[in-house]
């Protein structure tokens, strides 16, 4: 079994005018690192990359790389609509000191397997660093299949990992089984928290899940339990995460909901998101409070944060 990891796709903190809140973002990075998260994914879907200009994305790359300063791994989401922009942003991130980039395929047209493979061939040939593929069919309207992935791995040594944001663990398991015989070190992460343990037991590397922005200490404890092969403790934490996952049902998209929850938890962060995302309303805020009370109760009941 591979050593489990949990990476956080970090929220991006904005000022009301849409500029980056430098100190707010730095606080988030420090909080995640101090809680024991294994790495930070900047400008994933949770980070609102799609609403940021190229200049602002580069500004955020500079900010995180300099502030984190190799305390944990930093992965940068660099997927753009064209090969040229993706390569430009990816190489900028690598040049600035990012450990790797994570690239979602273009997300406007539903692409064929041939188009997807062509796109990543061109990108991988031109990017001078490690690449993680990002599969999110609900947003791109196409699936980055295990067969296409294997073809790409056979041609590009710099493709080293994969984030599979699908709810069906069978899809991720097939990917792991398809590639691991030829590429045993290839890392496959699930995109939904509830699949973390199943992912690792299937031969994957863990999870990249947005709820770790809110309770990073819980997810760090989960990693320790799995790596220590303490299945009873892992099961206790699974109950907490399953309850916490109900936050996805409070509002869509869920990013403003998570930001409100972080504020309610006592984090000194601004809640602004890029338009057209709306802030949590009064009813949603009450639902968040109720859910967090239940989650906090489970954490206390199971001694999740401070085990004896």
Image (cartoon, grey):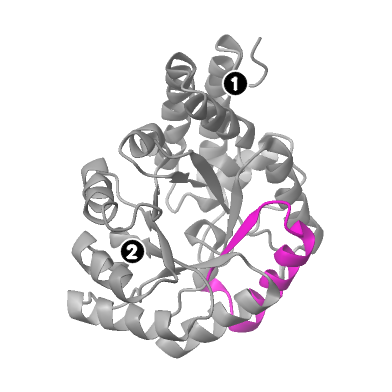
Q: x%, y% of residue 118?
A: 27, 83
Q: Residue furthest bottom?
A: 84
Mark 2–mark 1 distance (CA, rounded to whole Å): 32 Å
x and y, in percent, of residue 23 in the image: 81, 58
Image position of 44 with respect to 108: above or below? above
Q: Is residue 88 visible?
A: yes
The quadrant in which residue 112 appears is: bottom left
The quadrant in which the C terminus is found is top right
Residue at the (59%, 19%) spot, across then down: 304
Q: Label 1: which residue?
A: 296
The residue located at (48%, 38%) in the rendering is 4
Residue range of the region highlighted in magenta in the rendering: 51-77
Residue farthest to the right, as pictured: 23
Q: Which residue is mark 2?
A: 139
Circle 1 SS class: helix
Q: In which image quadrant can residue 295 be found?
A: top right
In the rendered structure, the answer to whether residue 255 lies left or right of residue 151 reads right
């Amino acid at each position: 079994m591979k050593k489990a990891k949990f990476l956080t796709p970090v929220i991006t903190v904005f000022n009301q005018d849409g500029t980056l809140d430098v100190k707010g973002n730095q606080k988030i990075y420090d909080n995640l690192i101090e809680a024991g998260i294994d790495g930070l994914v900047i400008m994933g879907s949770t980070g609102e990359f799609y609403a940021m200009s190229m200049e602002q994305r580069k500004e955020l790359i500079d900010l995180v790389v300099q502030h984190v300063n190799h305390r944990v791994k930093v992965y940068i989401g660099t997927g753009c609509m064209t090969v040229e922009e993706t390569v430009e942003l990816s190489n900028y991130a690598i040049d600035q000191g990012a450990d790797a980039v994570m690239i979602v395929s273009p997300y406007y047209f539903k692409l064929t397997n041939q188009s997807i493979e062509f796109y990543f061939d061109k990108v991988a040939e031109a990017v001078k660093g490690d690449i993680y593929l990002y599969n999110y069919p609900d947003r791109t309207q196409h699936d980055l299949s295990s067969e296409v992935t294997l073809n790409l791995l056979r041609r590009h040594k710099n493709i080293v990992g994969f984030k599979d944001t699908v709810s069906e663990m069978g899809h991720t398991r097939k990917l792991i089984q398809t590639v691991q015989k030829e590429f045993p070190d290839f890392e496959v992460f699930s995109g939904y928290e509830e699949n973390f343990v199943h992912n690792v037991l299937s031969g994957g590397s863990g999870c990249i899940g947005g709820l770790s922005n809110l309770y990073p200490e819980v997810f760090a404890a989960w990693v320790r339990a799995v790596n220590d092969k303490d299945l009873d403790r892992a099961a206790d934490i699974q109950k907490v995460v399953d309850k916490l996952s109900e936050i996805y049902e409070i509002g869509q998209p869920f990013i403003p909901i998570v930001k409100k929850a972080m504020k309610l938890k006592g984090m000194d962060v601004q809640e602004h998101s890029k338009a057209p995302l709306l802030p949590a309303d009064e009813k949603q805020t009450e639902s968040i409070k109720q859910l967090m009370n239940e989650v906090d109760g489970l954490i206390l009941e199971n001694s999740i944060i401070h085990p004896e």
